[in-house]
Image: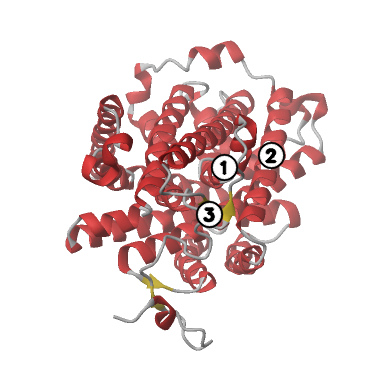
Amino acid sequence: MENMTDNVSTKPTKLAGYANGPSLEEVNGTVTIPKEKGFLKNLMAFSGPGALVAVGYMDPGNWVTSIGGGAKYGYLLMSVILMSSLIAMLLQYMAAKLGIVTQMDLAQATRAHTSKRIGAVLWVVTELAIMATDIAEVIGGAIALQLLFGVPLILGVSLTVFDVLLLLLLTKLGFRKIEAIVICLITVILVVFAYEVIIAQPNMGAAVANFIPRTEIMHSGQLTMALGIVGATVMPHNLYLHSSISQTRKFNREDPAEMRRAVKFTTWDSNIQLFGAFVINCLLLLLGAAMFFGKGTDQLGTFGNLYAALQDNQLAGAVASPLLSTLFAVALLASGQNSTITGTLTGQVIMEGFINLKIPLWVRRLVTRLISVVPVIVCTIIYGGNEAALDNLLVNSQVFLSIALPFSMIPLTVFTSSKKIMGEEYVNKRWVTVLAWTCTIVLTLLNIQIVWESINSLF
């Protein structure tokens, strides 16, 4: 067999090569870890991958499901955001541990430990999940461009294809700088929404009370929105991404103490960043509930109407201003671009891991984005640029992500629960395995229910 140097040709005419090396080989083990023993110094050294993962928990898909959930059902779905975030922390911990201990990402592990047929099915489902994620980015970016610059939706959707240029620029900066840029954009989003929720004056007593699940969530409409929130929060592609970028830190993998340090501080990084994503998602739902719940229309939860409401004294109060609306649109654009970075990296992980195919990032990004743009353009044309129709498409894409999630959760749980794969020290504790399987089974049953109800509604 040819070696990696022979296969990854430097000729500009060759767009594809054979991939059988480390996950994301270009950045694998490139971030040096200092020898300091202090907790904060270690945490800072390992911080970064968690931020890239957290981006997926606050993309435009989260915006429309969380704001829409608040607009339609008030504070009812706060418990769904809490449970989704706790599940996310558990799954991302297992994904990062898999990558550090086995030095394989989830796609590589699936290829190594399952049959070709099962691997092919999982690859197809995961590729569809990435496209569903990309649909949210397309819609969010197009609406942000319309709000900021008055760009028509159909043109804005088309312009999102060119975000590949941003990706090409960022890949030249180095992985650590990409992490820093992502963290800055997350901070912008957090500050914007914290300020806007303060002026919206939500009922915090009702919000906190609804962290305890209520039976009303199981009603048809509420369940659909709840699964949309789950799909937008616990995203399948993040499990593949985290199992890969957790390997970017350079340390002595033959030293047991170094391995334990890597797993420990990668877990700290992940949980801290995901807690930040949890706060942002809570802010989104609080904003939707405080401003729109009980207003007598289902259309108040759209990005455009929220943008307009932030300039409306009757809704936002005396502090309403064009500045607030502009900040909202800037945060929306930042969210979409953040997701673009992580979505493209995940696409590379999946393609190289499942089918050993290596192509340039810009080619991967362009193909995925062109495929994702098609349904959005069709929807835009059919509904005459109606933003509400695009929001419905976005919600449905997030429900699909929820349906696709068990296809990633099952192999992740199987692999990390295997002593043969993980070793005696790093195999899941029994309570972790039981909890992971419980989450998988419950989510699968809820997905079956919502699919069955959707089929019945057609007849």
What is the number of the mark on residue 187? Answer: 2
Q: Residue at x 52, y 36 (%)?
A: 265
Question: Residue placed at 54% from the left, 13% from the top?
Answer: 206
Of 399 and 42, which appears nearest the observer?
Answer: 42
Q: What residue lies at 27% left-to-right and 55% top-to-bottom?
A: 110
Q: Secondary structure at mark 3?
A: helix
Q: Secondary structure at mark 1?
A: helix
State the image quarter where residue 322 is shown. top right
Rendering coords of residue 211 (x, y %): 47, 17
- 211 relative position to 174: left or right: left
Left or right: where does residue 129 sit relative to residue 324? left
For residue 29, which numbered disc appears in the image?
none
Q: Camera-side residue: 240 or 335?
A: 240
Q: Residue furthest front?
A: 255
Residue 122's spot in the image, x, y percent?
27, 56
* Disc number for residue 342: 3
Tell me how far mark 1 sits from mark 3, CA to CA: 18 Å
Spatial separation of the CA atoms under disc 2 and disc 1: 18 Å
Contact check, label 3 and label 2, Cβ < 8 Å: no
Determine crowd level at label 3: few under 14, some 14-19, many 20+ residues with C-alpha closer than 10 A.
many
Residue designated by label 1: 46
Instruction: Decide which of 11, 52 is in the foreground and name it.
Output: 11
Q: Earlier in the sequence, mark 1 or mark 3?
A: 1
- Number of marks in the rendered image: 3
Report the amino acid beneath label 2: Thr
User: Which quarter of the figure has residue 231?
Assistant: top left
Ranked by sequence position, the earlier of labels 2 and 1 is 1
Residue 441, relative to residue 388: is it above or below?
Answer: above
Screen quadrant of the N terminus: bottom left
Kind of residue sitting beneath label 3:
Thr
